[in-house]
Amino acid sequence: MSEKKALDPARLRQDFPILNQTIHRQKPLVYFDNGASTQRPTSVIDAMDQCYRETYANVHRGIHWLSEQASAQYEEARLKVARFINAPFPEAVIFTAGTTMAINLVANSWGRSTLKPGDEVLLTICEHHSNIVPWQQVAAETGAVVKFVDITDDGRLDMDDLRGKLSDKTKIVAFMAVSNMLGTIFPVAEIIALAKSVGAATLIDAAQHVPHEPTDVQQWGADFVVFSGHKVLGPSGIGILWGRKDLLESMPPFLGGGSMIDKVTTEGFTPGELPAKFEAGTPPIVEAIGLGAAIDYISAVSLQWVASHEKLLSATLMKRLEKIEGLTVWGPAPEHRSGIVSFTIEGVAAQDLAILLDQKGFAIRVGHHCAMPLHQRLGIKASCRASFYLYNTIEEVEAFADAVEAVVKRLR
C-alpha cells in the first residue's frame, strides 16, 4: 500500500470485505468492537486460502515438496513477527493458541518451577482475566501470593501503590500495556525498571498495544511479551509468546507430545531446542501464515498514525458523550488513552443500550470485558465499550454519538 492509502481510513475500509455491508434493514455496519477482535483484510484471507489450496501440509515432519513449502512459509511468519516487535532471536518467538495460552505457558512453566511459598506475584487491578486466573491457579499450588496494584481516580496506574507493593518477595510483575476497558496506556518501560530494581521478572500483556503502537521488546527490557493474532488483523487461534532466550531455555516444557522433543525413550525424554520446545503437536500452520500476511499489511501502515488516529476518534467521542446527562466515561483523558471508550449511563442498562445500538448498525461490546475485578473496583457491574481501529472514521464516531443520544432518549 502507498502512504496515501495508509493514511486514509475510508480507503483502508475497501480492503476489509466484512465492513462493506448493511445489516438490520439496510443499516451500514459500523464495527466498534476492535478491542475484542479486529477484522481481516483481503490479503490475509487470500494468503490463508492460497495455503489451503496450494501448499498445505504438516510442517517440519516431511521431506516432500508440500511440507517443505509449508515449513518455509511457517518459519517466514516467525521471522516477520520477530522483526515486527524487534525481537533479537526469532527462535524466542513462540507460536501459541493466543494471548491466554501464552500467559498460561509462562505461569505453568516459569511459575511452577520458580515460585515458592511466600513469593509474590504482582498484577494490576485492571488485568484481563487471562492474566489473573493462571497466576491464581499457580499460586494456589505453589503457596505464592497474588497482589494487585490499584489505579488512581482518573483510571491511571497508581505508581505510588506500585512502589509500595514491590519488595524482595516480588518474583514477577505481570501487567497489560493498555487497559482493554479503560483504554489507559501504562508506562511500560517505567514499570519494568521498577520491577528490575527488586529483581522481579516481568510479563507484558501487549494484546491491546501491538496492533496500535510500535512495539520494541528490547527497548522495553521485558522478560516476556504476549499478544494475539486476531487483534492485529490476523486470524483467531494463534498468538505470540516472546521471551528472553535464556529464560525460555531454562524453563521446562509446558505441553508434551510430538515436535517438542529431541529424544524419547521408555525411561524419559529430552526436550527439543527453541522454539520447538514449546510448540507441541501440530502447530497453527495456516494461522501463522495468515498472521504473517497481517503483519505485512500493518507494517505498510504507520503505527504512529494509527495511534494518533485512534486518539482523535476517542477524543471526539468523549467530547460528544459528555453532553449526555448521567453518562460517565471511565478512564483517563484522551492523551493518556488508546482508542477505547467505555461508558455507563445512569438509569440505562448497558445491555439495553447495546441491543438498540446494534439495531442501528453499531457493533460494540457490553459486559465486564473479562475485567470483573476492575468493574468491582469502579463500583459498576457492566459497561458499554466502543473500540476503534485504523479503518474507523470520524463520520462513524459522529453517527455513533447521535445514535447514543437518540437511544438514551428512547429508553428514558
Image (spheres, grey):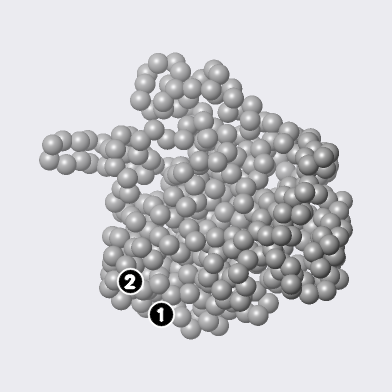
Q: Amino acid at mark 1?
A: Ser
Query: Is 57 in front, or is 92?
Result: 57
The total number of labels drawn is 2
| Image quarter of the N terminus | top right
Residue 184 in view (yes/no): yes
Going by the image, does 250 lie left or right of 83? left
Q: Amino acid at mark 2?
A: Ala
Q: Which residue is mark 1?
A: 167
Residue at screen point 73% across, 47% down: 31
Which percent across, then down, holds residue 392? 78, 48
Which percent across, then down, holds residue 398? 86, 56
| Image quarter of the C terminus | bottom right
**Which quadrant of the view contains residue 259?**
top left
Q: Residues within 10 Å of mark 1 (few under 14, many from 20)?
A: some
Q: Is residue 306 above or below residue 127?
A: above
Q: Which residue is mark 2?
A: 144
Which percent across, then down, holds residue 397? 82, 55
Query: Is 355 in front, or is 313?
Result: 355
Residue at screen point 43% across, 62% down: 133
